[in-house]
Image (spheres, rainbow, N blue to C red):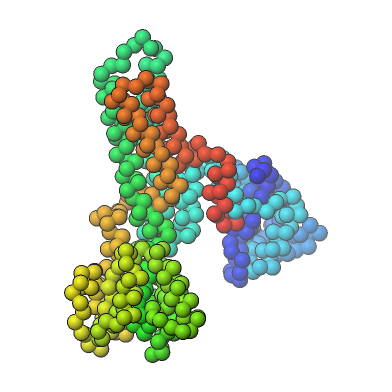
Amino acid sequence: MNRDDTITAPATPHGEGGIAIIRVSGSQAENLMKLFFRPSSKYSEIYSHYFYHGLFLNEESEPLDEVMAVLMRKPRSYTREDVLEIHCHGGYLSMQRILETFLKGGARLAEPGEFTLRAFLNGRIDLTEAEGVIDIISARSDRAARNAFRHLRGDLFKLLGNIRSQLVDLLVLLEAYIDFPEEEVAIPHFHDFSHGALSAEKAINELLGSFNVGKILKDGLVVLLLGKPNVGKSSLLNRLLGEERAIVTEIPGTTRDTIEEYLSLGGFPIKLIDTAGVRDSDDPIEVEGVERAKGKITSADVVLLLVDGSQGLTPEDYTALEFSHGTRRILVINKQDLGAVALPGDLLQLPHVNVSARTGQGFEKLQDLIIEQVAPAQGPDIGESVILSSLRQKEALGQSLESLGRFKAGLKERLPLECLATDLRDAIQSLGEVTGETLSEEVLGRIFSRFCIGK
């Protein structure tokens, strides 16, 4: 990937709207503005970070659209390069014609995430902030957005920077003794090494302990609805969503395939999966639907096991119970508006709630039970804490923790100082992988490929 050329891409998605934005970054951004933009008034100079009204022309100097243009000269721009933005009328054709004009003028189409990658490579943001960008774009709940913003503003980078600084200070002290081998390591300094390693280890462990809730914030808590036909799964889905998403009829087996929808509960993103009713059938489509339901169970964080509370349990209920064995389950006893019959005591050992999908009875408690599935991971309150949400970051911190463990063990065994220094360097190196200071270009490419075009 060439870092010296000029790139361009739409910064807004395709479709009809009030405005669309085409972004350009690189050394030729200002030249492209002079080539294709004609301001409606004459100016002796184009100032940085000012909007100008005018016409956008093609290479034959034919007007394409009435636009607003803003030039942001380096280094005061997102990429720390010269950046040009053209704000045109929303719509595929106008945006496409302007984009094609820039391409003919010498720019190339940006790769996914390349604007943010340039911001990272040019030192405007670190890798945790860059990953915060994509997380805030894809956030599906208030808590997820707040956590992504904390990463975006550099909270994780600052926390890791403090840990890294502490370990670097230890390494400097350790290498001073290596450079002067005739000096005996002072006992207080051994205490410093041990205390420093323990302090860093504690901080890293706290971050790693937040990963489970961070993963839920990022990917959503997967909640699967399971039960026999006509037990009210689709009605429950519609009630939770607040809209008629799934078809509901008195005919058993209406749902043949899985239906997946997102909602937010207690600030957490929830992915709801409605499934085909569990029963024996000769209908090959219904059989396939049941197989798909079984396949989704293993990927669910929570299974809502629905039973009809107005009737006794049937063989299909026990089949659904067996299918979901080994998963985290909430027993949802539906149709309370039609009366209730006693259920087996062993079944009531599961977390359970009585509801009516028709009237909404019991739904506040059901929502509380779903959110409680996150509580063990999040602790009493995530508040303003930095929450780890990236598997890549988790693995790098785990490697740093392993290196610190070897360093501590080496201190106890009084291993040669060179060995201790190697473990300490490894711990620092792994911290650098989280912030992007010690990552290869190949890994960076994989990270930024998850971004959308134009960001």
Q: Is residue 193 visible?
A: no
Q: Position of residue 132 (x, y in %)?
A: 46, 51
Q: Position of residue 323 (x, y in %)?
A: 35, 70
Farthest residue, direction right: 60
Q: Is residue 323 above or below residue 146?
A: below
Farthest residue, direction top: 182
**Observer-nearest residue: 289 or 373?**
289
Q: Position of residue 48 (x, y in %)?
A: 60, 47
Identified at 25% across, 89% down, the residue is 338
Counting the numbered discs, the total is: 0
Q: Is residue 159 left or right of residue 392?
A: left
Identified at 33% across, 26% down, the residue is 410
**Observer-nearest residue: 208 or 408?**
408
Q: Is residue 428 left or right of residue 409?
A: right
Q: Is residue 342 visible?
A: yes
Q: Is residue 138 above or below residue 431?
A: below
The quadrant of the rendering that contains the C terminus is bottom right
**Observer-nearest residue: 343 or 144?**
343
Q: Position of residue 179 (x, y in %)?
A: 42, 14
The quadrant of the rendering that contains the N terminus is top right
Q: Quadrant of residue 52?
A: bottom right
Identified at 40% across, 29% down, the residue is 423
Q: Quadrant of residue 311?
A: bottom left
**Observer-nearest residue: 103 or 204?**
204
Identified at 41% across, 46% down, the residue is 394
